[in-house]
Image (cartoon, rainbow, N blue to C red):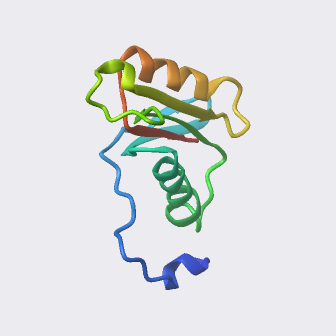
Amino acid sequence: MSKNLDSFIVQSRPPPEPIAKSQEIRDRGSIFFASIYSAKNSVEAQACIRHQKQVLHAAKPATHEITAWRCMSLKPGKSGLGGPDDFTVRSANDDDGEKNGSRKILKVMENSAVLDAVVIVTR
């Protein structure tokens, strides 16, 4: 059983579910795996990150949860009908103690044109 209060909270919406998970990768005594979630904005991205860290990994915390997210949103005062200039891409990343790991994840997301997603690499 989970050792946090999240298991007692009743929510009106279901918890975030990953779109995909990677296989484990073992490197120099560490085990890594990645999860990707859908996120339409920074609030949803942070909710996915918190859920994985505080609920899914609460019983056995990971050494690091390296994260990166990218979301497209409307610019203030724009309707979306004006074309591509009505939109902006917001992104963020967090190394959680790993050196430059999240920047590399964000770069792959940018090069692959991944939008409205958060990637979490767990060590």
Above-or-below relation of 63 to 16:
above
Q: Position of residue 52 (x, y in %)?
A: 51, 56
Instruction: Say which residue appears at 56% left-offset and 38% top-offset.
Output: 67
Q: Can you tell which quarter of the image residue 65 is in?
A: top right
Q: Would residue 94 appear left or right of 108 to someone viewing this image?
A: right
Counting every numbered tag in the picture gives 0
Instruction: Say which residue appears at 50% left-offset and 18% top-offset.
Output: 107
Q: Would residue 52 appear left or right of 116 to someone viewing this image?
A: right
Q: Position of residue 19 (x, y in %)?
A: 30, 46
Extreme residue toward the front, this view: 77
Instruction: Say which residue appears at 69% left-offset and 40% top-offset.
Output: 96
- Compare residues 97 and 62 and report the one nearer the observer: 97
Instruction: Say which residue appears at 59% left-offset and 80% top-offset.
Output: 5
- Compare residues 37 and 123 and report the one nearer the observer: 37
Q: Position of residue 89 (x, y in %)?
A: 46, 27
Extreme residue toward the top, this view: 111
Q: Position of residue 69 (x, y in %)?
A: 49, 35
Q: Can you tell which quarter of the image residue 15 is in?
A: bottom left
